[in-house]
Image: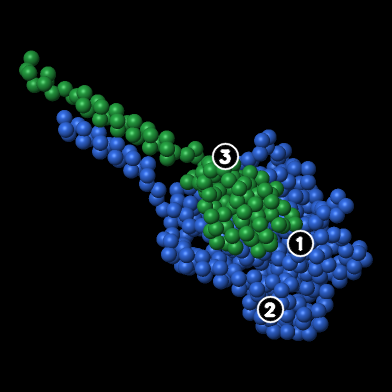
Amino acid sequence: MIKAISRIFLLILIILSLGCSRGPTVYHQQLLVFGTLVDIKLWGVKQKKAEEAVAQLTKDFNYMDHAWHAWHAGPLTRANYFIANQEPFTAPPSILPLIKRGTELSTLSGGLFNPAIGNLMHLWGFESDDPPHGPPPDPRAIQTLVDQKPSMKDLTVDGITIKSSNPGVKMDFGGFAKGYAVDRAIDYLRQVGIQNAVVNAGGDLRAIGSHGDRPWRVGIRHPRKEGILAAVEAKADESIFTSGDYERYFDWKGKRYAHIIDPRTGYPAHGLTSVTVFANQGDLADAAATALFVAGPRVKDWLPIARAMGINGAMLVDSKGNVQMTPGIRDRIHFEVDPPPPVSISEALH
Amino acid sequence: MDTQSRSIPLISRGDGVVIGVAVALLLAVFITLWQPEGHGAEAVVYLNGNRWARLNLFQNQDIKVPGPLGISQLQVRDGKIRFVDSPCPTKLCVHAGWLSQGGESATCLPNHVSVQVLGDDPRFDTINF
């Protein structure tokens, strides 16, 4: 009798304790750096270790932000000064890898991603701490800068000495520095033994491992409405980058001028509102998101660029709200809007 | 028939009462602690990247967050939270609208204020915005 009662109590206790067990928790921290919000989540890491890792990442991000800032005085602005004055200079070690990687990525993109158009970014008012505003610049001033055809290929790197054959080159790493920084952050986390993490620098995201027994869940913002357009689960090591015309822009006389400039015309790229790229590395995903945004909504324009850059998938939203995507990701994208947008699937990337 | 089986029933009336109470307790605990999956009952407000407040979303209230540019106004209503106003030019935070799902977030970058809805099993771990 007593046995029976105690057995039942034991059973109830077990059920109750199962309900209470929570397992490893997520450590979450947000940083304000790179002019954006960096969201860091670590799974299954002890509080103290997580705090130490995030403290180091904060220092690293702040250092990179300073070193690569396009308009705050620092290593990059000094380099740009020498380029504009046609003087050879010794490259600061902090920016040398970005010059190399930026040149590679620009070449892969057929020049649509071009980190040498800093003068255009400045002219449009996107290199500023103040929000961009109209009116748009004088068309003749734009054309003058486009005619200079600034390209990373104009730079000659000899050891650590750099020379530019084109005074129109002004480096602006805004299109891939965040991706590069996210890659370095993931490298660091792995070095200290953290295998499950997601680092999201304002839509520039790389995830490693998982959230325990399930993948990391990513929401992709709707480019025009409140809330989430689509959800996707990240693979064990994957970069998912979203670029949109809603991030930095100004409206002038009913027209939107967004921060992604087409280097061929000197004007903001139009036709798309949001591009999400899936890739192995953050810097590649970042540059590719910019390049596809510039390529525009016609599949014959963007697909060759996506193929050349070696990304794993892409989802593009045009200004009418139509969605295009590569076949490899179609089963991974879950739309969170009702009804779901019209979707067309492109040819395979590979 | 032997007499033992009659004198020791499997469960006596007293046992029944105890089990009944235990089951009722279990139900009560379940109802109090269980939240619909993914729906966050709490949100965290960050200011300058630091945790500034943790809010129960079922406790309706209006909150003023003092950022570097001025006051960001938040509103909590029936399990949801939103930015009502913020001293920023684009009002992206206000346009984010109501947040209720675990993992949903909105940010006023210029004023260094952000809000994230918590959840045991959030719909999203992070948002690409």
Furthest-right residue in this view = A140
**Circle 1 Cα neighbour tier, 10 Å, few/some/many (<14 / 14–19 / ≥20):** some
Nearest to the observer: residue B100 or residue A183: B100
The residue that disc 1 covers is: A131
Q: Nearer the viewer, mark 2 or mark 3?
A: 3
**A5 lies left or right of B25:** left
In the orientation shown, which residue stands out farthest toward the top? B1
Judging from the image, the colouring scheme is by chain
Is residue B106 visible in this depiction of the protein? no
Mark 3 falls on what kind of element? Answer: loop
Q: Which of marks 1 and 2 precedes in the sequence?
A: 2
Query: In the figure, residue A39 lies in which quadrant?
Result: bottom right
Of A116 and B40, the residue lying toward us: B40
- How far is mark 2 from mark 3, CA to CA? 50 Å
| Alpha-carbon span between mark 2 and mark 1 | 24 Å
With B11 as the anchor, is B116 left or right in this view?
right
User: What residue type is disc 1 on?
Assistant: Pro
Residue A75 image label: 2
Residue displayed at 65% across by 73% down: A66
Q: Amino acid at mark 2?
A: Pro
Chain A takes which shade in the image? blue
Disc 2, SS = helix
- The quarter of the rendered structure image containing the N terminus of chain A is top left
Task: State the residue position of label 3.
Answer: B78
Within 10 Å of the Cα at label 2, are there few (<14), some (14-19), or many (20+) other Cα atoms? some
2 and 1 marks in contact (CB < 8 Å): no
Q: Residue A5 appears at what percent x and percent y?
A: 21, 32
Visual hue assigned to chain B: green
